[in-house]
Amino acid sequence: MTLWTRLLHRRRLDAELEDEIQAHFAMAARARINRGETPAEAERQSRLEFGNTLLTKEVTREMWGWTQFERLGQDLRYGVRQMRRSPGLTTVAVLSLALGIGANSAIFSILNALLLRPLPVAAPEQLFVLQQQARTTVPQRFSYPMFERLRDSGSGAQAIASMSHVMRAQALLEGESQPEIAPVQLVSGEFFTLLGLSPRMGRFLVPADNENVRQPVAVIGYGFWQRRLAGALDVIGRKIRVNGAAFTIMGVAPEGFRGVWVEAPTDIWVPLAMQPQVHYAQNESVHNGDLEKPWPPQESIDWLDVMVRVDTPSVPAISGRLNAVFLEALDRFTRSESAASRRNFLERSLTLEPVSRGLSNLRQRFTPLLLAMMVLVVLVLLIACANTANLLLARAEARRREIAARLALGAGRAVLARQFLTESLLLSLAAAALGLAIAQWGSALLVRSALDVTSGPAPLAAGVDQRVLAFTMALSLATTLLFGLAPAWRAARLELATAIRAGSRNVTGGSRLTLAKCLVAFQVALSLLVISGAALFVRSLHNLAHVAVGFDTEHVLSVRINPRAGGYRPEQLSSLYRQVIESAEAIPGVRSAAVSMCGLAVECRSSSGGVNISGYEPRPGEEVRVQYSRVAPGYFSTVGVQLAAGRDFDARDSGSRVTVINQALAHRYFGNRNPIGQIVDAHVHIGEKEGSEVIGVVRDARVNRVREPAFPMMYYPLEGNVVYAESLEVRAAGDPTSIAAGVRQRLAAVAPNLPIDRITTLSEQVDRSLNQERLVSVLTTIFGVLALALACFGLSGVLSYAVTRRTSEIGVRMALGARPAEVTWYFLRESLALIASGLVLGFPVVLLVSRWFASMLYEIKPNDPLTLAASAAVLTSVAVVAGLFPAWKASRVSPVVALRHE
């Protein structure tokens, strides 16, 4: 019989043991009666012969193996009674630990979703993505013909599939009138087979679906099926329109699968051949291709990621075969190129990079910040542990008589230590349960705040799963040891004679270095680290909020438009933009309006490499890169970017024959030369045989992110180019929010099919671009306040306990003539000594650790003396205030009342 079975049948086994003992007594007594003894004497002698029945039962239970469980149950029940006996201490300890554990679990859950959680597919460790390596920066994308070569190369890979990036598109279900913006991905027919998934309903895409553009099919995600169709069983065969193109729903993805892009959960998957029909146009690299023609047949447009399923031992061999096919194709593709361009292409090579945890653009950006936040919340938890340890030490001192009684009755020191650790474990488990609730709520809030998501499902599924639960349980056990060992060790070391004399309160030697005081100094040191970190991030955010961005943020309204999703054809764009601008400028209170390819402070980047600039000779190995945008006339004056030299675009400018550059490009590549009239060839317009003449220079503007200095920038006219603009900027005479409703109404009237994603002021747009920095600043401030409060609470608690224990000593001092001010200063001096010890311990740690934050700060050094001095001053001031109350309480002790305690 196993231990678990014996535990389940414990009562029956106890009854059987009792029956067996009684049967033994009866047999022994009957034998004695048969030998002539009286019944009473026979029973007495039998029991004497048998011995202690309770001991026999205990020995038998020991052999059964459940005694330890019984003792654990007794310790747990006793611990619960102790928690109920001290509700104030229990509440403070559980809340402080729960905040520390919850914050750690919340940050870890985001790290888990971003870095640790594998894709919910078959054997994710066998998934790889093809990457291109070269001496210079190269695009990590492939054309559809190149994908077909790699797929059909006979490389030995189990499967090869391709996919686009996830795009936001208008999705309209059959029978509905209001479309919604849904994430859509174009994939090859091998995509779901490569992932090893099984559909929840219907079937997945197959290679044949990529050839059938007349009756295209789509697969929808489980979340979309539940959210929009309420899990309808007749979903297979229903119609759905994606950016106006009709698809037949043929399958539903399994629950839990949200795509392979971690931060871009996908709702709809459609075949790659439908690229022109759904107007997909993003994340492309073009080399002599035509963006207005369908992309799949074109060799010169790279727009796909390629995934490969490979057995891990076969990776080198398969990588070599794929690389040979890739280089052979590049050799044929570049035969008509110049020698330099051909050499750059042929220097590339392919590698297989693991993608078991999915693809993500956020990992590199958010991982350092998340690790920094993890360090801070661990420090807060350590402070909470030290604070709880002090509380339990104080309670252990108050329980000396209980400990003495248990020692006198024969309790072992190991039993006492186990009891105290069990009570600590109960506190940790209660804090962990509350911390998990905090983590579940807090992780979702953090993700939404960091990614500026106000509605719909969170793009990053950070929540409590098995890994987060295991982390929280491990954290709970670690905290149990951290704050539970001190009182357990103290209880196990207590001498019986000392415990019996515990009634006397005449405890001297208050200035000696005790464990409780060491813990307070430790709290102060950690608090200094957290507070100084918070101060650095707050000052960094302040610097970012006041940086000159180079454009007017106060009087401009930014309208995010999407003419491609609205189904506008290239020949309609020029007329559409003219109507949009004229209708916006006709609104009362509007000074000007302009359309641009990209908005400001939204990280809309379009770059070009291999730029030729007249008069500039690149250094060996240097690749001249610029960022470009296309804008309508009057754009610079509308957004407040000042013209430094030359002229702005006007009605006579079109195509890419002329360009306006920014000062960053002029200073970097023209030096002291006058750039006006010079020629720049950026290879961004198909069909142009010559470069662009510089007609103007504008001042630098931080068009991507506020913390990024201006990148070398080229602006081209919107007219004469097929550009699906994404932004309309409207300059108001006063408050731009006052014209927002009018702009929306006018646009709906002149362009009813034009989707409007968002209308915000430029100041709000810039403010949103600082969401990440603001979130870090707010979190570190919260952690700093919490650390400060816990440290001050610990200091106040230790001093209050010292006053209580030394009441008799204080009474004697005051009876001998000590004044209240002297008593107050005596205890306040002790408080200052603890604070000073903590600061001396904390400053070297701050100087060492703060260097790690250097890359996350803006225009402030991690060891900034003013910040460190201010942090120390705040900590000292608040801690002194926290120590004043127990010091004042000591000065109010009456000598007569105090001496009665003797």
Image (tube, grey):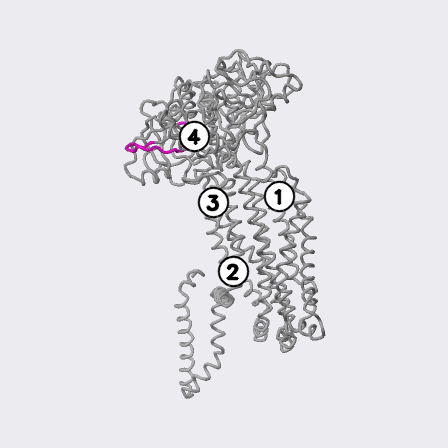
For label 2, the crowd category at 10 Å Cα-Cα, with few meaning under 14, some 14 to 19 and many 20 or more, is many
Q: Is residue 242 left or right of residue 490?
A: left
Q: CA distance from mark 4 to mark 2?
A: 48 Å
Do we see residue 730 in this rendering? yes
If you read the primary sequence from the N terminus, does the residue marked by circle 1 or circle 2 appear first? 2
Residues at discs 1 and 3 in contact (Cβ within 8 Å): no
Q: Residue flagged by tag 4: what amino acid is it?
A: Met
Q: Residue flagged by tag 3: what amino acid is it?
A: Leu
Q: Secondary structure at mark 1?
A: helix
Q: Secondary structure at mark 2?
A: helix
Q: Magenta residues, as a range?
A: 172-188
Residue occupying the point 35% across, 40% down: 227
Can you identify the residue that label 4 sits on? Answer: 167
Q: Residue flagged by tag 2: what amino acid is it?
A: Leu
For label 4, the crowd category at 10 Å Cα-Cα, with few meaning under 14, some 14 to 19 and many 20 or more, is some
Q: Is residue 183 magenta?
A: yes
Quarter occupied by residue 895: bottom right
Can you identify the residue that label 3 sits on? Answer: 445
Q: Position of residue 621 (x, y in %)?
A: 63, 21
Q: CA distance from mark 1 to mark 4?
A: 37 Å
If you read the primary sequence from the N terminus, does the residue marked by circle 2 or circle 3 appear first? 2
If you read the primary sequence from the N terminus, does the residue marked by circle 4 or circle 2 appear first? 4
State the residue in front, 833 or 416.
833
Q: CA distance from mark 1 to mark 2?
A: 34 Å
If you read the primary sequence from the N terminus, does the residue marked by circle 1 or circle 3 appear first? 3
